[in-house]
Image (cartoon, rainbow, N blue to C red):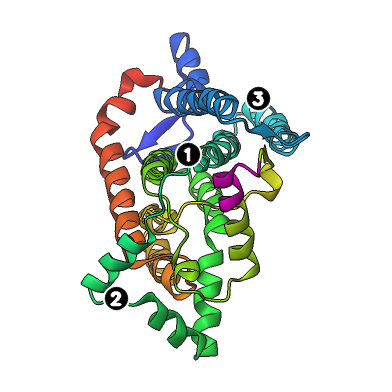
C-alpha cells in the first residue's frame, strides 16, 4: 500500500520478505499514530463520562449503549472480511465510521454531563454582542419565515449536517483519499472538544428562547432536556433521545468550515460542499437556533481545529507513525 502525493492510496505489490510485512501493516489503520490518537481521545472521553456522570448523579438509560455497540459490530465484521481481501479502501471507510460512532456516543454523554454544571446563562451577553455588530437574529428569522422558499432551503441545509458526516467519510474513503479523511475526522474531534470546553463555561438557551419565538418540536425537545439537566430533574441519559445542547459556540458553524475544507483538493466536490456549508452556517440564524456570536465563535473553532491538525500533521503522519 503506497501513498500518491500523501493523498490517495494506490495498491502496490508487496516486496519480498520485510516488504510483505510492511504491506500488511499498511492495511492496518488502527495501529497508526493517527488511529492511536483518536482511540486514545475516545477512551479518555469515555473515562470522563464515567467520572462526571458519577459525580453529577447521571445514569445511562438501560440499553442505551446497545445501538452503538451493534453498529460497531456490524462495521467490524465486514472490516475483517475486507482486510483479509486486501481491500484497503473499504477497511478505511469502515474503521473511520467506527471511530465516528464511538466518538459521537462518548461526546453526547459528556455534553449531557457538562450541562448539569448549571452555570449562569449568557444569552443577554450574546445578544448584546449581536447588537453591537448590528445583527438582529429575530429580524433574520422573521424575514426567512416570510419567504417560504428561502425557509425551505435554509431548514434543509441545517438538517444536512448529520448526513454530510458519513457521506464525507465514505466518499473520501472510496476515493482513496486517506490523508484528507484522517485529518478531517481528527479536526472534527478537536472541534468537538473545544466546543464542549467553551459550552461548559458559557451555557445559553439560544435566541429562539431568549426572543420568545415559537419553538419547533426539536427546539422544544432540546430546551426541556437542557433545563431538566440544569435543575436536576433529569438524571438519565439516552443516546437515542439525546438532543444537541450547545448554543455557544455553534458546532454547526464549526462543522461547516471543516466539511467544506474536507474536499479542498477536489474542486468538483469542494465547490458544491462549500456552497452547501455556507448555507449551513447561515441557517443557524435563520432557524433561530443560534446567535451571530455563536456563529462567529463556531467558525473560529472550525478554523482553529483545522490549523491545529495541520500544524501537528508532520508528527502524526510521519513515516515512523505506523504507515
Mark 2: give few (<14), some (14-19) or many (20+) Cα within 10 Å: some
Residue 155 against residue 48 in the figure, above or below: below
* Residue 292 on image: x %, y %: 33, 67
CA separation in Å, label 3 and label 2: 56 Å
Q: Nearer the viewer, mark 3 or mark 2?
A: 2
Looking at the rendered structure, the secondary structure element under dot 2 is loop
Q: Are marks 2 and 1 in contact (CB under 8 Å)?
A: no
Secondary structure mostly taken by the magenta-highlighted segment of the chain: helix
Looking at the rendered structure, the secondary structure element under dot 1 is loop
* Residue 146 on image: x %, y %: 50, 91
Badge 3 or badge 2: first in the primary sequence: 3
For the point 49% across and 70% down, the residue is 208
Q: Which label belongs to residue 84?
A: 3
Q: Which label belongs to residue 323?
A: none
The quadrant in which the C terminus is found is: top left
Q: Nearer the viewer, mark 2 or mark 1?
A: 1
Q: Are marks 3 and 1 in contact (CB under 8 Å)?
A: no
Magenta part of the protein: which range? 226-234
CA separation in Å, label 3 and label 1: 47 Å
Q: Are marks 3 and 2 in contact (CB under 8 Å)?
A: no
Asked whether 228 falls inside the magenta stretch, the response is yes
Residue indicated by mark 1: 117
Asked whether 188 falls inside the magenta stretch, the response is no
CA separation in Å, label 2 and label 1: 30 Å
Q: Which label belongs to residue 135?
A: 2
* Residue 158 on image: x %, y %: 51, 67
Amino acid at each position: 500500500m503506497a501513498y500518491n502525493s500523501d493523498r490517495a492510496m494506490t495498491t502496490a505489490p508487496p516486496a519480498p520478505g520485510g516488504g510483505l510485512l510492511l504491506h500488511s501493516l499498511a492495511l492496518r489503520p488502527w495501529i497508526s499514530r493517527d488511529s492511536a490518537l483518536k482511540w486514545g481521545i475516545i477512551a479518555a472521553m469515555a473515562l470522563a463520562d464515567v467520572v462526571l456522570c458519577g459525580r453529577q448523579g447521571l445514569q445511562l438509560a438501560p440499553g442505551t449503549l446497545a445501538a452503538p455497540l451493534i453498529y460497531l459490530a456490524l462495521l467490524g465484521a465486514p472490516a475483517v472480511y475486507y482486510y483479509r481481501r486486501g481491500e484497503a479502501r473499504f477497511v478505511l471507510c469502515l474503521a473511520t465510521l467506527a471511530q465516528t460512532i464511538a466518538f459521537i456516543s462518548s461526546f453526547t454523554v459528556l455534553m449531557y454531563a457538562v450541562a448539569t454544571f448549571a452555570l449562569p446563562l449568557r444569552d443577554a451577553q450574546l445578544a448584546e454582542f449581536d447588537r453591537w455588530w448590528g445583527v438582529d437574529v429575530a429580524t433574520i428569522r422573521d424575514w426567512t419565515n416570510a419567504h417560504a422558499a428561502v425557509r425551505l432551503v435554509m431548514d434543509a441545509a441545517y438538517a444536512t449536517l448529520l448526513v454530510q458526516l458519513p457521506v464525507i467519510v465514505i466518499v473520501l474513503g472510496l476515493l482513496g483519499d486517506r490523508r484528507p479523511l484522517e485529518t478531517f475526522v481528527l479536526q472534527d474531534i478537536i472541534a468537538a472538544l473545544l466546543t464542549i470546553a467553551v459550552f461548559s463555561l458559557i451555557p445559553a438557551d439560544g435566541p429562539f428562547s431568549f426572543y420568545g419565538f415559537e419553538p419547533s418540536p426539536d427546539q422544544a425537545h432540546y430546551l426541556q432536556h437542557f433545563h431538566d439537566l440544569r435543575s436536576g430533574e433529569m438524571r438519565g441519559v439516552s443516546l437515542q433521545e439525546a438532543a444537541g445542547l450547545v448554543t455557544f459556540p455553534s458546532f454547526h458553524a464549526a462543522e461547516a468550515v471543516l466539511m467544506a475544507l474536507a474536499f479542498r483538493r477536489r474542486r468538483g466536490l469542494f465547490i458544491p460542499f462549500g456552497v452547501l456549508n455556507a448555507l449551513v452556517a447561515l441557517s443557524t440564524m435563520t432557524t433561530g437556533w443560534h446567535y451571530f456570536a455563536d456563529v462567529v465563535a463556531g467558525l473560529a473553532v472550525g478554523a482553529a481545529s483545522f490549523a491545529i491538525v495541520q500544524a501537528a500533521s508532520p508528527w502524526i503522519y510521519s513515516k515512523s507513525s505506523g504507515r
